[in-house]
Image: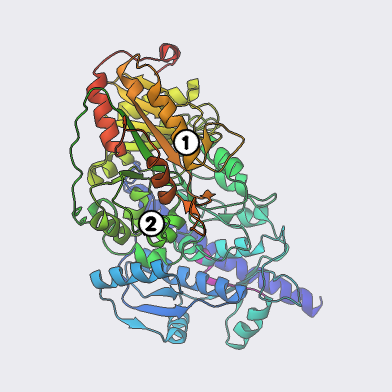
Amino acid sequence: MTKRTMDRQRGVGMMQRYLILASTFVLGVNSAVAAVGSRPPARSWPAFPVPSKIYQVRWPKAFDKQIALETLAGLAAYHARITGAGPMIWINSDQASEQHWFKMYHRRYPVPISTDWPSLVKQMQKQGILKGYVLYSSASPTTAGKHPKAGDFSVNLATSLCAPLGAVALDDSLAVKAQKQSLPKLADTRGKDMAWLLAQLHGRFSKRLLGLLLPQQPNQRDELVAANALVVSDNPAGGYRQGLLRMHPGGIVVGWGGNELDLTSLASKYALRVCAADWVRNLPVLSSGVTGLKYPLAKRAIPAAAINDDGHSHYVAFINSDGDNLAWALGGFTTDSDVWGNPARGKIPFGWSTPLQVLLQVCPCTVDYLRSSATAQDDFTPYWTGYFYLDEFGRLRGGLKPFDGILRRQRLFMRKLKLHTMMAFCANKWNSHAALRGYRHIAAMLPKLNAVFVVQYDPYAAGRGKIIWLPRKPGGPLPVLSALASIWNMPSNKYAGSPKHVAKLLNRWAARPVKQPQDRFTWVVVHAWSRFKSPKVGGKPQQLFAAAQACIGRLGRGIKVVTPEALAILLNKTHGPVAPSDHRLSHVKR
């Protein structure tokens, strides 16, 4: 037997021993959680204790060091989560929003801070938390530390093994330095695939949270390691379908991939939700302490004003798109001058679509900030906890039964946040039989809901302002409102376009004969990423809030702009308890 063969067998044996020990430990933790009861928890995201100390580390420039730091931070948080105590790592960057959330967090929890992170590494080694490293492949010998090659998923496999093995993920260049510091190699994921990984630790990863990251994406790995999540990619051979199959229905897919429609559609069919969070850092720290339903919310500074219907005006509400995007909510949403940071915010009624239920679990400081800085004109219209297509949910597994569990949690969070409207998303036809079945479940499970604002993947305004009424007991019928138009840079669709174009559509709508009271109520979805040329010479391009403001400035006197909540209340009062207006409802089974 050659020395190389002996070394290889010795390495395989070491890995197998670690896997057996890790599997036994993780299985014990999962069994203890399962023993609490089969009822799904109110929260979808892992909870963490307040760290005993926070070690601040500067975000490195090189990809290999970013991966090493993310997985090290995740391992520290994982140990704190399963033991109930311990230090954590905060990764410093130049992003203003991250610094803002940390300041708010530290005011609430004045944890000791240190920059001596090498001492933490030694401490983790001494305590047996950091046992070694998992090796993944770098791009090439001449580009060490750069992004991996396309089709190489070894960095995701390595990230997946960090929590079970007590390891940090390193590439070839950093592995040499680790060996000099007596940090042993526990596994080698180079040239391996998802089948290999699941053969080693099948069933030993979280069944409620799945990581979805492109191999070249370093962010969010701290949270995924801390949650003991399997990390996959939606690229071919990236293990996405394998990861979905092993998840509990109703679970959440955290991260993002390459094709929005395909990845979200597949997750929806397997009764799962997607949370766009691939640009997020430091969630273990931000979600430590009291979060979720037990978090004491700061009071909203200015309550919304009451409004009465004059009987002849037309009413319209504006709501931004992409409110499911956690990375945006924790990033540019609060700081950018096109969004919450617009100096004109508060001058017009506007519906802010945000993932408030998720934020309450992972960074309640953001919820406090939004509520305390909101004006009477700012309304919150939440997505449910994750992005999925209602008309495809559970098609390949579980049907709508897991959806009822999601709605039960939704009801708890909406009661906590005092919200009475929500947004829904469909992949195909917004008024299909499958979609209508989903609306019926919403009506049954959320009796205090005032309205559902629904959009279709393409085009957003497929319903052209039509309203479906769903009977429910107790209470009056629930209105499901399709968007009349979308402020979206999509010239191919006549119900989408510039602020000027959408204003023409709204004025034309208000000029039509009113055949029934509901004809005077509608809403517009404002695409988050579309930009439009300013009418002023040299003016800044109009985006989101400014685009809505420009549209409103062109509306006729007979149109009144209201918040989504006000629109829902006025619509319900005007319509009254009547039978559903869409004849197809009678053909949909409950």
Residue under the image location 46 percent in, 57 percent down: 327
Query: Which residue range is magenta in the image?
Result: 163-171
The residue most toward the front is 537
- Upstream in the sequence, badge 1 or badge 2? 2
Is residue 573 placed above or below 229 in the rendered structure?
Answer: above
Name the disc covering residue 502, or none.
Answer: 1
- Residue 484 appears anywhere in the view: no
Mark 1 Cα-neighbour bin, 10 Å: few <14, some 14–19, many ≥20: many
Residue 303 percent coordinates (x, y): 18, 47
Outermost residue toward the right in this view: 2
Residue of label 2: 46
Q: Looking at the picture, tell me which residue is in the foreground, 556 or 532.
A: 556
In percent of width and height, residue 107 lies at 25, 72
Q: Is 565 inside the magenta-drawn segment?
A: no
Tell which of 179 and 461 is nearer to you.
Answer: 461
Which secondary structure, mark 1? helix
Disc 2 packing (10 Å; few <14; some 14–19; many ≥20): many
Vertical placement of 329 versus 549: above or below? below
Q: Is residue 484 left or right of residue 531?
A: left
In percent of width and height, residue 163 lies at 50, 65
Mark 1 or mark 2, whichever is nearer to me: 1
Query: Which residue is found at the position 39% from the left and 62% from the top?
Result: 335
Q: Is residue 513 left or right of residue 461?
A: left
Mark 1 residue type: Val
